[in-house]
Amino acid sequence: MRYVLAGLLILVPVLMGATADKPNILFILADDLGYGDLGCYGQKEIQTPHLDRLAKQGMRFTDCYAGSTVCAPSRCCLMTGMHTGHARIRDNSFVPLAPEDVTVAEVLKEAGYTTGVVGKWGVGRAGSTGIPTRQGFDAWFGYLNQVYAHNYYPPFLWRNEQKISLEGNQGGKKTQYSHDLFTREALTFIEKNKGGPFFLYLAYTIPHANNELGRVTKNGMEVPDYGLYADRDWPQPQKGYAAMITWMDRAIGEIMERLKTLGLDDNTVIFFSSDNGPHAEGGVRPTFFKSAGPLRGIKRDLYEGGIRVPMIVRWPGKVKPGVVNDHVCAFWDFLPTAADMAGVAPLRGIDGISMLPTLLSKQQSDHEFLYWEFRRRAKGFHGPRVIQAVRMGQWKAVQKKGESMELYDLESDVGETINVADKHVGIVSRIMEYLKNARTVSK
């Protein structure tokens, strides 16, 4: 067990957890999938039958938030239980996790779990302290670098701390699609560890664009074929975007079927979400499929469209099927939730709150505030570079450096169309007071 004093993390085994059955935990993360990109969230054109079935068999959240509006900090929040005011990684730079950062994998290993990650890591480059095998994961396969992960036909991937050459992608060939390799690896991990308990973090890169390819061809949506959408009268990037999402959906259906075949279905909790809102990259127009649903903004915004994401949780016999839940939660809640499921408590010094009570339809403690910050680094960008956002109950505040605070009533205006800051001075003052201590100095 780990004891860290001075207000940091303390893990103590819960006695009842030492004898209670521990569920397998599978967290599947999409990359740049919008709030409105799944059928169960209102999508009309892109077919996602397996994820829609997952939602019918479990709980679908309407008010779940990613850790950030871009890749690296969002994944850092998911792994460490910290929001971006306290997390080590707060923008999309290449800052690695440090030895003193405690990840969900380390927490679950303390509870006897075998831990694995497949796909896109993005919080520690090769040789750094942030690579998965130095952050609590027993097994790792995929991309370390989030930029290198743009390429769906890479010449190599990482297995643990070794670079693995992909012969089918050498010399200009494109025969080994990384997403399919990740699905195969995930199935192998599940099969190998069917005796459980296991934690698998499956971080797909779909539907992120290959930005570099997109700058050359105007279509950065890499997928083996357009499938159901090949004959649609759509622009090529939109066909690719839809095909990628359906491709991922089919893979998730295969994983669900394998869990059932292995007899693991009832004792495996499946989480599904996306690391941030939809992108406008690789030729894709997020308005084409209404990828953000009714929300304002996309990836790189701290408006709802940039940070509110799909969240589905399925746990047969524990989570009631077909439930739509408006509990306000965020990625930093996953670590304490997983710890709660594994019988490890308490967790101190993190920002997350276990949402296990909500999953079990019991009384839930709520966040008073959710907090995000984002520093824009894009060249040629002339707007405010530091942006903060807060959700407090029905209220959403956006604070751009050097500008007046914006305030929106999400209960009546989920699209954040009317700034009501001047009508609710008391709410603005309360949020401004919170912002004084919402963040620590960057680590």
Image: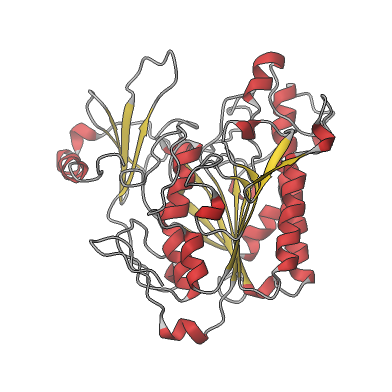
* Camera-side residue of 41 and 197: 197
Quadrant that contains the N terminus: bottom left
25 vs 153, left or right, is left
Q: Can residue 90 be seen in this view?
A: yes
Q: In which quarter of the image is residue 172?
A: top right
Please state the horizontal and vertical placement of residue 203, each as a whole percent of the image.
Answer: 61, 48
Residue drawn at (73%, 54%) of the image: 185
Q: In which quarter of the image is residue 404?
A: top left
Q: In this view, does 200 lie above or below 224?
A: below
Coordinates of residue 364 in the picture (x, y in percent): 37, 68
Number of marks in the rendered image: 0
Residue 359 at least partly seen: no
Q: In this view, does 123 lie to the left or right of 329?
A: right
Residue shown at 77%/72% (left/top)? 262
Residue 23 placement (x, y as % from top left): 58, 73
For the C terminus, give its image quadrant.
top left
The residue lying toward the viewer, choosing from 201 and 320, is 201
Residue 288 % position (x, y): 63, 27
- Eyeballing the image, is 422 above or below 11? above
Q: Nearer the viewer, residue 340 or 393?
A: 340
Indicate left or right for 260 with 136 as reference.
right
Q: Say left or right for 343 vs 371.
A: right
Q: Considering only vertical position in the picture, is 72 above or below 321? A: above
Q: In which quarter of the image is residue 236?
A: top right
Q: Which of 37 and 352 is in front in this view?
A: 352
Task: Please name the colour scheme applied to the rendered image.
Answer: secondary structure
